[in-house]
Image (tube, coloured by chain):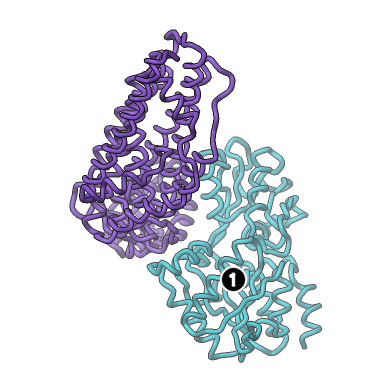
Chain colours: A cyan, B purple
Amino acid sequence: MAVWYTDGALIMGAVAYDPKVVAIWDGFRDYFERRGLEFDYVLYSNYERQVAAHVLGYVDVAWNSPLAWLETERLARLMGREARALCMRDTDRDLTSVIVTRADAPPRRLEDLRGTRVGVGARDSPQATLIPLGLLAEAGLRPDQDVEVVPFDVMPGKHGDHVGGERDAVQALLRGEVEAACLIDSNLLAFAQEGTLRPGSTTVLARTPPYDHCNFTVLDGVKPELVERFRELLLGMSYADPAVRPLLDLEGLKAWQPGRTSGYRQLQAAIAAFGTVDAFVEQLGARCV
Amino acid sequence: MRLALDDLGFDEGGQILVKRALRRIPEGGTLEVTGQAPALDVHLTAWARAEGHGLQWVERDGRPLAVLTRGDAETARWSGAERAGGPDPREPGAVVESPPQRWGLAARGATVEAGAPDFGFGLVSKNEVWADDAVRLYAQAVAAQWDPNTAVPWDAPVDLPDDVEDAVVQVMTYLVENETAALVVPSRFIAQLHPHFREVMQLLAIQAADEARHVEVFTRRATLTRTELGLSTVGGQQSLKTLVDEPDFAIASFLLSVLGEGTFLTLLRFLERHAPDPITGAVTRLAAQDEARHVAFGVAHLRRQLTGDPGLKTRLAQSVHRRHEALRQSVGLNAEVFDALVLLAAGSWELSALRRGSHLVAQLLRDMDEGRQAQLRRLGYAPAEAAELSALHTRNFM
């Protein structure tokens, strides 16, 4: 009897933002292995640890947040390599974030936020912090100078994957502790439907242009045949397949789409302006090159 | 197609209207949505993305117009779904022979999404459990439910000689013990039965509820005059344990419902006829009504099963022999119960009364035997075989 180990497997990194992550990736592993792709996964407690593992070669593929994608892309460039966004969910495309205020109180225009408190999600959340603050900055409202940023820092390191920070920001808005709150469009809908936000209680003051979210990231030259098979199998997953549908429902998609990188420009501009990942990239980059 | 939501938002049910409109167009077809609710554009964007529908915003007459393109997710979700039989058991195909475990708890006649988990129901064959009479018997059982508080004249006088009252309490103690077995046995099978056989499940459930009432009224009668109940014996419990331990549904039905409750029916009618007080008469009469239904279902489903499974007849007969062997060393009916029946039928310690009571109980045993033989003949046993099997039935009656 021997232990279970496959040396040639494709290893994927993912961040454990919720216990359901285990069910999701166990299910995916079964799906891939039934189709002849040796696959395994490693869970990290935060995206920076995962990015480090990826660029240092401990994992072959990373299921990355948009911020982790940009970190990897910069590190790859430093190393003279190329990062590629392999696939993404249909629900990762063309997201928007909103800045909402209470319907019964000013401000009425973006400019009215000057000098007020703005509630955001986790400080590393692209959707609930970095991209909306980028929008404010472009409008001349610099964080911590022209507006007071109030972070609701649930699970730092998980890049806002947990909904808690956005919910806390919205509840602070309803209690009058902040004058505006930033959140992703799907949570505005979810909070309305679950009753956190009563109909008519908030006003959408501003909305970002569309942007993209997670992707499977690979670095050039890593197990190209396995990576290609992985991509094919992902794109071949059908919502009509009862064995696959529960996994897609858990991961929140109807179909996988080819990766694209055109939807990360707003986040790129925001982190360039705020210097969000500079220290991390510099520190890790020094080890990699 | 066009849908005007006016000022109805997605936080007030707007998405239900959108869903309904999308179902009326083919996949790939478009639906134009207009509305003035605040944040409709944000909500609609997020909703369409999550549901897998395409969405484009165009300007029409100076106002934004959402153009939704119906996606295929809903069709894909239900593409492998199955219809789980039909609700009306009289319709052909409504109750299938072997419902799959994946239909699980779904209502019979529902559309079941593919991929549901397999349940582990042990009784999944129509032939094993079904009786066409189940529908009628269930309806009858529901209509015949009685309220122990009002159906029994609890205020009627009970003024019996002490010894006769003791006999009544002993008989009630014995009845409670036996009715508890009759509650536990069908309850165990309800959990094993595939819920596709809804009417059988309902019938077994109401049977268990019947027994619950019997346990209540017999206990109440016993405690009208006494603070303690009578005796429970090893022999009685050994006999009942063979029923509780029986894992086979057909055999358990045969031993409990046909032979056991059949015998009990004769006993309850005897007790009603010779009841020394109106309350004893009422509780035994009401219980007998229910037991008659339990026997009818047992006979009905076994008769159906016997036609499709000729080997069952032998297995059932063997089960009587096995139970007889298992109980050979036990006493069976406790002497106190037997004596109590004689005294109850006699009504006093008068010698002539005791003689009459003794004759009546002897006749009761003959009636029980004849009743069992009649049921066995209804199941297809030849008269000689029926007589032999009846003679081997437990001396504990149930």
Name above or below for residue A199 compared with residue A255: above
**What is the x, y in percent for residue B196?**
33, 51
Q: Residue at x 63, y 48 (%)?
A: A167
Name above or below for residue B191 compared with residue A82: above
Q: Which residue is mark 1?
A: A264
Q: Quadrant of the N terminus of chain B?
A: bottom left
Q: Residue at x 77, y 88 (%)?
A: A289
Q: Quadrant of residue B367?
A: top left
Q: Taking the image as drawn, is residue B2 in sight?
A: yes
Task: Single out the residue that lies furthest toward the front.
Answer: B351
Name the residue nearer the viewer: B297 or B380: B380
**What is the x, y in percent for residue B338?**
44, 29
Name the residue nearer the viewer: B260 or B18: B260
Q: Secondary structure at mark 1?
A: helix
Q: Residue B21 vs residue B350: left or right?
A: left
Q: Residue at x 69, y 64 (%)?
A: A158
| Callout 1 amino acid | Tyr
Name the residue nearer the viewer: A195 or A202: A195
